[in-house]
Image (tube, coloured by chain):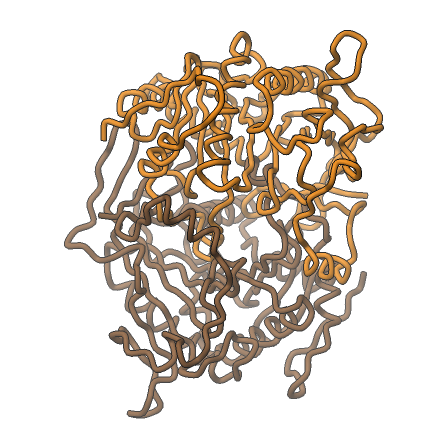
Chain colours: A brown, B orange
Amino acid sequence: MSELRKDPVLRRWVIIAQERARRPGTFIEAHMRTRQKDIPPEECPFCHNQDPEIFALREGEGAWKVKVVPHGSPALRIYDKFHRHGYGPYDVTNAYGTHEVVIESPEHIPGMADMGDQQIKDVLFVYVQRLNELRKNYNLRYAVIFKNYGLAAGSRQIGHARSQILATSVTPIRIKDKLIGAKRYFDYHDRCLYCDMVRQELEQKERVVVETEHFVSLMPFAYRFPFELIILPKEHHSDFTKGLKGKEEDLARLLKDILTRFKIGLDDPAFNLVIQTAPFRRSRKNAKWQTLDEDYHWHIEIMPRLARAAGFEKGSGFYICAIPPEAAAEYLRDVQIAGDEPQTTPVTSHA
Amino acid sequence: MSELRKDPVLRRWVIIAQERARRPGTFIEAHMRTRQKDIPPEECPFCHNQDPEIFALREGEGAWKVKVVPHGSPALRIYDKFHRHGYGPYDVTNAYGTHEVVIESPEHIPGMADMGDQQIKDVLFVYVQRLNELRKNYNLRYAVIFKNYGLAAGSRQIGHARSQILATSVTPIRIKDKLIGAKRYFDYHDRCLYCDMVRQELEQKERVVVETEHFVSLMPFAYRFPFELIILPKEHHSDFTKGLKGKEEDLARLLKDILTRFKIGLDDPAFNLVIQTAPFRRSRKNAKWQTLDEDYHWHIEIMPRLARAAGFEKGSGFYICAIPPEAAAEYLRDVQIAGDEPQTTPVTSHA
């Protein structure tokens, strides 16, 4: 049985996936062979997918447009009970949770850069539906919605756009750390840190890539890797499902714009995309990082995998970045993207 | 001028290396071309190295055996002053610090697996000398000693063993987090967490790879990536330079043993090695994570780069690991290493 184990020093959790464990020898061989696999449409497991349907978005009663299926080798699953126990100085729980795959299109389209705005909007709609459904299970505290694009981003089967949703019984440490950081700022300033960032960045413009009516995409001032990007909603909301309401089309257009700039300007890079929303609910136990809606601000992170962390970064959590975010933002702003007249207007840097 | 920037949410620092900044276009081209370069000895910049010498270990007055030189494009440097300033909601300092390269041998040897024990001992001796020297600068708070082996570990020139020392004016966040975690455990239990781990792991043996007189190497119970390994000294010391005294030879032998097991058993994998020691000194300001010598315990982390973090890990700090540490440890214990009769005795698992 798989289990969750907690690092006793850093208090982060890891899923030790016993059920899908590979023998180390097999793992090494697989590692040596690892190549990105371009799956042709006729062999693609996501085209004409027959997996049991958790949820699907349909045109009337017709074929699905976006479909959610269980992950083939899930890292987490629903057990009768979520239980915890100690093991010497260590903490363990069963691997309670859910692991779903969102097939973003019935067609063999590699990513959002190649989709129409409406299709991206449909995917966002499905994310919201799943979060609202998963939230009902009181053993689940958080759901991470993410996307791996390309081998360097941890995806091995390339060619058919999809994302994953992992719902967990503990709040992941990076989410906690963000909540704590935002709360600390709010306690001190009585203002939301992310709202302040939006204001500062829109004034200075140097790190902004694209601004739309409801969102701003920018390179964070202290980013870790070249071209790391964050999409911030201008309006304050801690929760993605609530904050997105009425802005789906604007975000879909922005995502397509950004990912097209990546594809053209950065040679179709591998990237990860993650939605950073607040936990499903608050509990008294975790008062330290409990936020009210007012001090956390949902956002999306997009991390192109162009540079690798080395020993310094891995060992210290301190990063060295050879391209200032101002230069990266300017570069992406200048990428010429084809297609329809863009609704979004790249800003001009004041720098 | 390069600068240090602090992420306002997560409070980690990043060095934005303006001085060695590459234009984004050039960076993309370089990224597309990136291949591991095997440097032949006749072109190797570390063979017959003529860089100014910061420190060298010599046989009498003869040629150097281990040499420390300034990094060719340093991420940090010594300025007249270490200064800090605010920038809107952000914190900035100048990139004060040092960046040195330790050339581990005059000969063109790729790594410690291929060195004699004495040579590894010499390298450890040089690490200690440099830490003791760097510690004298009161603007420096911490020095990260690390090694990148192989392209996937962030090294581009392969073939000549070396390590790096980056001394910083701020304590890196992962070090702080470890100090806080260890202190929290000590405050609660009145015992060192790492000492407890040593005892627990030596009793259970399942995750131990090799035990020597003074050290134990093991796969941590909640490790993030397959074959991540930690070397713990049995005797409690917070500081590497003090804790190593009299145990240099034992550690050198262990390092060679472990890295040989990696090389043979894991197909010569890329890896990072990092020494995790306490900060140079304590300051009242940082009482929260200040430790006494009694609650932190120095150690070495070795991280083979066999698996990649994907969107889930990147976004949440929560990891999925497909090989349980018990299986990985058993696999490495069973690797047959050639050469002299080993001084180290692989343990037998009780599992």
Q: Position of residue B252 (x, y in %)?
A: 54, 19
In-image side of B215 versus B40 (left or right): left
- Residue drawn at x 53%, y 31% as measured from the top left: B176
Q: Quadrant of the N terminus of chain B?
A: top right
In-image side of A246 versus B285 (left or right): left
Asked where in the image residue A271 lies, by quadrant, the reply is bottom right
- Residue drawn at x 30%, y 23% as measured from the top left: B200
Q: Residue furthest front?
A: B339
Asked where in the image residue A336 lies, by quadrant, the reply is bottom right
Asked where in the image residue B342 lies, by quadrant, the reply is top left
Residue A221 versus residue A41: which sits nearer the camera? Answer: A41
Q: Quadrant of the C terminus of chain B?
A: top left
Figure disc tally? 0
In-image side of A164 versus A257 (left or right): left
Residue A178 versus residue B329: which sits nearer the camera? Answer: B329
- Residue drawn at x 36%, y 74% as measured from the top left: A45
Q: Position of residue A290 (x, y in %)?
A: 39, 48
Q: Position of residue B328 (x, y in %)?
A: 36, 38
Q: Is residue B91 visible?
A: no
Q: Is residue A273 visible?
A: yes
Residue A233 versus residue B239: which sits nearer the camera? Answer: B239
Q: Residue furthest left?
A: A80
Q: Position of residue B285 (x, y in %)?
A: 59, 25
In-image side of A285 versus B147 (left or right): left
Residue B170 versus residue B9: which sits nearer the camera? Answer: B170
